[in-house]
């Protein structure tokens, strides 16, 4: 483990940005999201979660993937791929880092999504332990350790120092390029990080959503969950705005459309939402014609279908964004509490 005085953080940022594009939590118009670092920037490293998840950097909200040029009866297909420059994300929380592992299962399984793969190959994820988890957090349910985040490099901050530990080959390669700024943390540094982890876990143990149980959310319970009368009560507040899907770090539905540009046809991919009435619309109609069915689909996928097909890994990381942002105060926590075995006893 390495140690860097907090006063030298800008030197670290400058060194990383010289080697690759660097993004950190930055505030603009009162909203904190990952933005490109430049000298003089004031990163919001104490801000818990950015408004938008880091999946934006790997699974773009919109992107052109191909174009078709017509010449008489001939069609020329052109791949509209913008090369991905090397980049680093600094300050990613444990939940967002875990979301990328979930997206990997979707986009890096056969057939591999090469657009996503290129960004994963070029991106280095530098995580930050959560010094002050908030009441909306429930990452421990999945389980994700906010005190010991994943990523390519993990960091911990105390009042006077940043502690740095490489966790992957990509993280080790970046560490080699910046390690001359650091000193060895030694046993005192290891102790400081251990104390920081203990303090974070003490907060996690006191969070109101920390005791949510996922017992019962298994493939064996699929039909019982699917037919539960609770769905009728749960879905009623939903206004189908799609906010939950767009701020969710693990939602990965998308649509592909062709547009006539006047110079040819452009094929574009964009995020979509299972909460919308035209989602999966086909020539013969929509397989889920009611909002209840669409609402149920979202949560059955996250809590039953996805884990049943991915070795028990749920498609949620407990980041709390949907808890904070749903205009109808409906979220996955309420679904888990209503349907879980040990949540409403």
Image: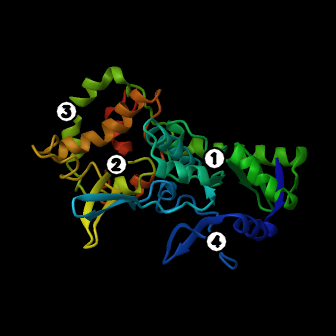
Mark 3 or mark 2, which has the lower sequence index? 3
205 vs 272, nearest the viewer = 272
Q: Callout 1: helix, strand or loop?
A: loop
At label 2, counting other C-alpha atoms closer than 10 Å, the crowd grade (few under 14, some 14-19, many 20 or more) is some
At label 3, counting other C-alpha atoms closer than 10 Å, the crowd grade (few under 14, some 14-19, many 20 or more) is few
Mark 4 to mark 2 CA distance (whole Å):
30 Å
Residue 204 position, x and y percent, is 59, 44
Q: Callout 3: helix, strand or loop?
A: loop
Task: Indicate left or right for 57 with 266 as reference.
Answer: right
Mark 4 or mark 2, which has the lower sequence index? 4
- Residue indicated by mark 2: 253
Mark 3 to mark 1 CA distance (whole Å):
40 Å
Residue 106 position, x and y percent, is 44, 40
Q: Are marks 4 and 2 in contact (CB under 8 Å)?
A: no
Q: Are marks 4 and 3 in contact (CB under 8 Å)?
A: no
Q: Callout 2: helix, strand or loop?
A: loop
Front tag of 2 and 1:
2
239 vs 337, nearest the viewer = 239
């Amino acid at each position: 483990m390495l140690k860097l005085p907090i006063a030298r953080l800008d030197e670290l940022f400058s060194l990383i940005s010289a080697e690759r594009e660097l993004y950190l939590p930055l505030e603009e118009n009162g909203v904190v999201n990952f933005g490109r670092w430049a000298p003089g920037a004031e990163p919001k490293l104490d801000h818990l979660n950015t408004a938008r998840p880091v999946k934006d950097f790997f699974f773009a909200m919109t992107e052109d993937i191909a174009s078709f040029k017509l010449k008489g009866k001939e069609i020329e297909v052109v791949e509209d791929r913008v090369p991905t420059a090397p980049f680093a994300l600094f300050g990613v929380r444990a939940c967002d880092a875990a979301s990328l592992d979930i997206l990997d299962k979707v986009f890096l399984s056969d057939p591999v999504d090469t657009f996503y793969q290129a960004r994963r190959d070029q991106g280095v994820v530098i995580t930050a332990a959560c010094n002050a988890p908030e009441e909306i957090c429930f990452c421990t349910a999945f389980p994700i350790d906010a005190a010991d985040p994943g990523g390519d490099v993990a960091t911990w901050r105390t009042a006077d120092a940043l502690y740095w530990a490489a966790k992957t080959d990509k993280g080790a390669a970046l560490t080699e390029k910046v390690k001359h700024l650091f000193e060895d943390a030694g046993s005192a540094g290891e102790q400081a990080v251990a104390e920081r982890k203990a303090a974070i876990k003490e907060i996690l143990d006191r969070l109101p959503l920390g005791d949510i149980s996922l017992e019962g959310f298994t493939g064996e319970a699929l039909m019982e969950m699917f037919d539960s009368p609770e769905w009728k009560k749960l879905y009623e507040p939903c206004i189908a705005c799609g906010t939950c899907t767009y701020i969710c770090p693990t939602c990965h539905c998308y649509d592909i459309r062709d547009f006539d540009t006047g110079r040819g046809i452009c094929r574009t991919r964009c995020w979509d939402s299972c909460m919308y009435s035209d989602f999966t619309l086909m020539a013969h109609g929509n397989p889920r014609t009611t909002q209840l069915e669409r609402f149920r689909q979202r949560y059955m996928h996250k809590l039953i279908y996805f884990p049943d097909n991915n070795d028990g890994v749920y498609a949620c990381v407990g980041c709390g964004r949907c808890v904070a942002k749903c205009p109808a105060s409906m979220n996955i926590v309420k679904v888990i509490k209503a349907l879980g075995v040990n949540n409403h006893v």
